[in-house]
Image (cartoon, rainbow, N blue to C red):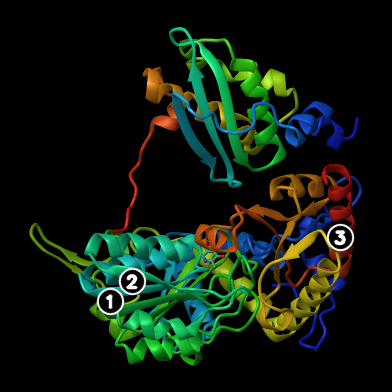
């Protein structure tokens, strides 16, 4: 297999070119957005809950590299029908196994963007724990 | 020091110059890297590496306070580097050259040490829409801290500053600072800094120039620019990392508060009172990166021997060729001004394909380009993109690098387009 075929596997390209659960849900119960400052990937994830905190439906929008968008698309399939609590502690390996390609540390951030954003959305509505890298707020400047 | 393998003739003998750079002996899949990321950081010639090694082996001890011979040699190396840097920038005095860790630190020094004392409500800080974050953010932050307003000079669709916006900015308050880069690291735009400096002085403002991206490629003459502060960085001009320099006008530097405190910047310390050292040491706290300063001076000597004019001409030919080739490809959009008004930098977009994917696939072809916002997010917003792919050239770049870039882009298009 060439390097291209290893990284841009058929299934990655498929999710990239025809993302699943694309488009934000209206109405939704939870929403969050985030970006990967390294390469400017952006993802917004919206969630609708069913019984209790079961994730009934997820929709996302975003723009960015193939890895970030395909991984978010795969994530949406992975989390439907599971509880907010369960997903808030979902090990990243479960998503990465699904993505199934060797990733350098930089590209890892692309692949995990959607999962981080989803966890933020769940945290906001259900108070589930936040991944460490999303909880630190080191201050910002807002100009009037 | 080895002889530089080129003369100051009009055309660079690039293939001979490349022999100065050990990195090109390294093969990736049988080929040397097509290194098109010099705007980020340049590769290093043996002349610089050898000089630093010799310094560490034969002239090394801490600078300034030592009385023994090794310390004297080290101090002479460091202060010699300051003279070389002053000459490189055509500074009136070497006392006006402050060594810093980077261009970023130099620009922060001005924003903090000058800005905190001199800005307040009613004052206006003017930057450009194509500033690097290293210049943009310190001024945004200090403006916010002091209550000054923070305004930008917009660019037009070609990425050139719209100077007719200046008078409007002047009506918003007392313009106290104008900060601009001389060459944009993302678009390669060569900005009219002399005119900005004239306007700034007409307003009673200081002119701060970020020359990080200009100094490696064209001669930077602080007097001709008419600036008050000029920042450069070593690692982009064939020098080591961890060293940069700030040139500032003596009267202003003397009137300024210090920035970092401790070490050689101090003259005497009492329980209640400390007095500061004279220029330039007043702004150099702690053990400076003096071995790196010696490396920087070796890099300046290296560039001087080749000739910055010849380097500029060489890059100009490459950028013209690159823009010609890229603009012919219908699914590529090139950003920024025409070739005759830019330095050796080309940012572009491959239709429908994220720059990160472009750079990844190019890497497998041995072509190194940068993908991202290049620390210019406000500019990305203006261009309406999240990121671009950027190819940049230097004295060791060859037309083959470009050919490999273009061939690689066709592969990108074939596999992801
Ligand atoms: C225009 C410009 N200004 C400032 C910097 C910052 O330089 P340094 O990283 O050496 O502080 C860079 C390089 O990244 C640059 O391109």
**What residue sits 75% from the left and 76% below the top?**
B315
Q: In the image shown, does A48 or B123 lie closer to the viewer?
A: A48
Q: Position of residue B110 (x, y in %)?
A: 35, 70
Say the numbered circle drawn on residue B281.
2
Q: Residue shown at 39%/22% (left/top)?
A: A125
- Residues packed near mark 1 inside 10 Å, few (<14), some (14 to 19) or many (20 plus): some
Q: Chain of mark 2?
A: B
Which of the two residues, A72 or B143, is positioned nearer the viewer here?
Answer: A72
Does any portion of residue B63 appear in the rendered image? no
Numbered badge on residue A143:
none
Mark 3 residue element:
helix
- Percent of width and height locating residue B150: 34, 68
Q: Is residue B184 visible?
A: yes
Q: Secondary structure at mark 1?
A: loop
Task: In the displayed orientation, state which residue is furthest to the top.
Answer: A51
Which residue is labeled 1 in the image? Answer: B278
C-beta proximity under 8 Å, tags 2 and 1: yes
Q: Chain of mark 3?
A: B
Can you identify the residue that label 3 sits on?
B406
């Amino acid at each position: 297999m060439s390097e291209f075929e290893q990284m841009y596997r058929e299934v990655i390209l498929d999710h990239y070119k025809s993302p699943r659960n694309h488009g934000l849900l209206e109405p939704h119960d939870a929403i969050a957005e985030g970006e990967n400052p390294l390469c400017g990937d952006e993802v917004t994830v919206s969630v609708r809950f069913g019984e209790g905190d079961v994730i009934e439906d997820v929709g996302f929008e975003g723009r960015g590299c193939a890895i970030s968008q395909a991984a978010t698309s795969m994530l949406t399939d992975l989390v439907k029908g599971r509880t907010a609590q369960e997903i808030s502690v979902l090990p990243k390996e479960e998503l990465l196994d699904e993505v199934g390609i060797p990733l350098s540390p930089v590209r890892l951030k692309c692949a995990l963007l959607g999962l981080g954003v989803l966890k933020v959305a769940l945290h906001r509505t259900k108070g589930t724990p936040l991944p460490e890298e999303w909880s630190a707020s080191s201050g910002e400047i807002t100009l009037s | 020091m080895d002889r530089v393998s080129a003369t100051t003739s009009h055309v660079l003998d690039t293939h001979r110059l490349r022999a100065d750079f050990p990195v090109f002996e390294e093969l990736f899949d049988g080929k040397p890297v097509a290194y098109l990321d010099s705007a980020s950081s340049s590769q290093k010639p043996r002349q610089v590496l050898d000089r630093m090694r010799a310094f560490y082996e034969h002239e090394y001890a801490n600078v300034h306070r030592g009385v023994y011979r090794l310390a004297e040699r080290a101090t002479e190396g460091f202060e010699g580097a300051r003279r070389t840097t002053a000459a490189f920038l055509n500074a009136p005095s070497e006392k006006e050259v402050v060594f810093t860790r980077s261009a970023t630190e130099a620009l922060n020094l001005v924003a903090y040490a000058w800005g905190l004392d001199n800005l307040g409500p009613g004052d206006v800080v003017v930057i450009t829409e194509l500033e690097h974050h290293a210049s943009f953010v310190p001024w945004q932050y200090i403006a916010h801290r002091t209550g000054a307003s923070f305004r930008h000079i917009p660019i037009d669709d070609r990425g050139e500053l719209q100077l007719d916006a200046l008078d409007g900015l002047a009506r918003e308050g007392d313009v106290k600072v104008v900060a601009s880069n001389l060459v944009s690291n993302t678009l390669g735009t060569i900005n009219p800094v002399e005119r900005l400096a004239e306007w700034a002085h007409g307003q009673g403002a200081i002119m701060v120039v970020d020359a990080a991206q200009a100094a490696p490629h064209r001669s930077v003459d602080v007097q001709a620019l008419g600036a008050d502060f000029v920042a450069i960085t070593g690692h982009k001009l064939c020098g080591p990392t961890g060293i940069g320099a700030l040139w500032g006008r003596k009267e202003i530097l003397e009137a300024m508060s210090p920035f970092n405190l401790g070490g050689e910047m101090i003259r005497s310390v009492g329980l209640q009172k400390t007095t500061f050292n004279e220029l330039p040491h007043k702004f150099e706290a702690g053990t400076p990166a003096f071995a790196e300063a010696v490396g920087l001076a070796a890099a300046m000597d290296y560039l001087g021997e080749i000739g910055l004019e010849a380097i500029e001409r060489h890059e100009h030919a490459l950028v013209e060729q690159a823009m010609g080739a890229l603009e012919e490809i219908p699914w590529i959009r090139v950003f920024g001004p025409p070739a005759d008004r830019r330095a050796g930098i080309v940012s572009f977009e491959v239709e429908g394909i994220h720059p990160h994917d472009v750079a990844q696939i190019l890497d497998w072809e041995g072509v190194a380009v940068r993908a991202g916002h290049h620390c210019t997010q406000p500019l990305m917003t203006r261009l309406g993109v999240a990121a671009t792919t950027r190819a940049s050239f230097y004295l060791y770049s060859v037309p083959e690098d470009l050919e490999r870039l273009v061939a690689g882009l066709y592969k990108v298009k074939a596999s992801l387009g």
